[in-house]
Image (tube, rainbow, N blue to C red):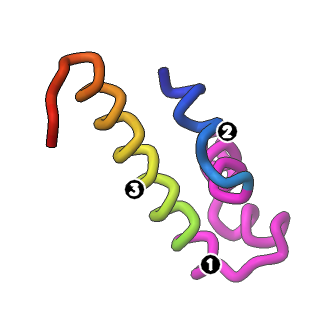
Amino acid sequence: DLRAALEMLPAEQRTVLELQFTGWSGAQIAAALERSPGAVRMLRLRAIERLREIVLRDADTELGVKR
């Protein structure tokens, strides 16, 4: 499930997504994490890419698909 996939992310990537999902803006997240807005965008991008990999891998495992 999505919660389990989120737990597999590095802490900072997970935090960025969790804050965004709760309505924080990129600027608010950047200030809270003491990071630049660009760094927050990259963390978010990497987190989404990693979540996609995890979810696809898990789906493939359940379906018995090999890539």
Q: Which residue is mark 2?
A: 22
Vertical placement of residue 7 versus 40, above or below: above
Q: CA distance from mark 3 to mark 1?
A: 15 Å
Callout 3 crowding tier (Cα within 10 Å): few <14, some 14–19, many ≥20: few
Residue at 48 percent across and 63 percent down: it is 46
Q: Which mark is residue 49?
A: 3
**First-in-chain label (3 vs 1):** 1
Please, what is the dominant secondary structure of the magenta stretch?
helix
User: Disc 1 on helix, strand or loop?
Assistant: helix
Q: Which mark is residue 39?
A: 1
Residue at 46 percent across and 64 percent down: it is 45
Q: Of the residues tagged 2 and 3, which is closer to the observer?
A: 3
Q: CA distance from mark 2 to mark 3?
A: 20 Å
Q: Could you tell me the amino acid type at mark 3?
A: Glu
In the visual, does 12 lie left or right of 66?
right
Q: CA distance from mark 2 to mark 1?
A: 19 Å
User: Disc 2 on helix, strand or loop?
Assistant: loop
Residue 31 belongs to magenta span: yes
In the visual, does 15 lie left or right of 2?
right
Magenta residues (range): 12-41
